[in-house]
Image (cartoon, helix red, strand yellow):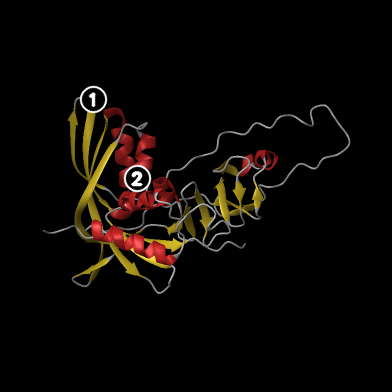
Amino acid sequence: IAIDEPTISMQFVVNDSPFSGKEGEFVTSRHLLNRLERAAIRDVALTIEQTGKTDTFEVKGRGVMHLGVLAENMRREGFEFAVAKPHVILKEVDGVRCEPVERAVIEVPTESAGKVIEYLGRRRGEMAHMEPFGEHTRLDFLVPSRGLIGARTALMTLTRGEAILSHVFEKWQPDQGSIPRRTNGVLVSDRPGDTVPYAIFNLLDRGEFFVPPGTPVYEGMIVGENNKEGDLSVNVCREKKLTNVRAAGSDENVKIPPHHVMSLEEALEYIEDDELVEVTPSNLRLRKKVLSE
């Protein structure tokens, strides 16, 4: 039986953050490797490789969702670990470096089809077929696997949650060119502590936050998205200085918009090469690989 070979690889790393071991039951590299090997025995499309480091394992699978389901299952079983950004596996075919191209079939409401075609065109997608049925349109695209990382979330936003995306490996092709990446930087906590409403309120013009008030944070943890390019270190633990003087209006209640909650798959699609997703049974945290400024 021919099995499609893996197209995406991701590193599973032993969690080394200041909060490691506080929430998970299984945290060591031995636990992590045993669990990944068990998964590889049960799942023929999954391969595990040792890297040069004792605390890092390379896991190869059929897509971000495939690896995301493995991480979610491990998390529910009490494992605690960190995962790096997913990467596409490259292969030499007749002396040319090639990347995997997938056939993506998207069913969308007809009024949203234009936005979807434009989005996949920016991600080096090539439309092979378009067929209307009822109030919907079925689009058939050939897209590099790189272009599909993060596509599911974006298509849901563009079509108000009505897109249905399925994709399967088609062929290997030479490099399809650059694909747009995340343009905004992130807000990084510069010290350990608990987030304070006063500090978040005064930083709202800097960007959108991923953590609510009262969340424990550590230095190097990502707490939000910057409005501009480049990363910004912020102090989300700053409390208001209390004085003896009372003035009308100085103690108004601060109003903070709801924080942005990410699923595991969205977090994996969001991070860049110098960042990790810390996965524990009770929390998902984004962090920098190097925690000190």
As drawn, the label of residue 151 is 2
Specify the label residue 135 is tagged with: 1
Tell me where residue 226 appears, x and y as whole percent: 56, 47
The quarter of the image holding the C terminus is bottom right
Viewer-nearest residue: 62 or 77: 77
- Among the two numbered marks 2 and 1 on one chain, the one whose residue lies closer to the N terminus: 1
Question: Is residue 88 visible in this depiction of the protein?
Answer: no
The residue most toward the right is 244
Which of the image's four quarters has the N terminus? bottom left
Q: Residue at x 55, y 38 (%)?
A: 259
Question: Distance from label 2 to label 1 (Cα)?
Answer: 23 Å
For label 1, the SS is: loop
Q: Position of residue 204 (x, y in %)?
A: 63, 40
Q: Secondary structure at mark 2?
A: helix
Task: Tell whether 227 sits left or right of 75.
Answer: right
Q: Considering depth in this image, is 56 or 243 the residue closer to the camera?
A: 56
> Mark 1, residues whose alpha carbon is within 10 Å: few (<14), some, or many (≥20)?
few
In terms of image quadrants, where is residue 61?
bottom left
At label 2, the amino acid type is Ala
The x, y position of residue 178, in whole percent, is: 36, 57
The residue that appears at 47% across and 51% down in the rendered structure is 280
**Furthest residue toward front:** 25
Number of the label disc, if any, that sits on residue 54:
none
Q: Which of these two is toward me, 283 or 244?
A: 283
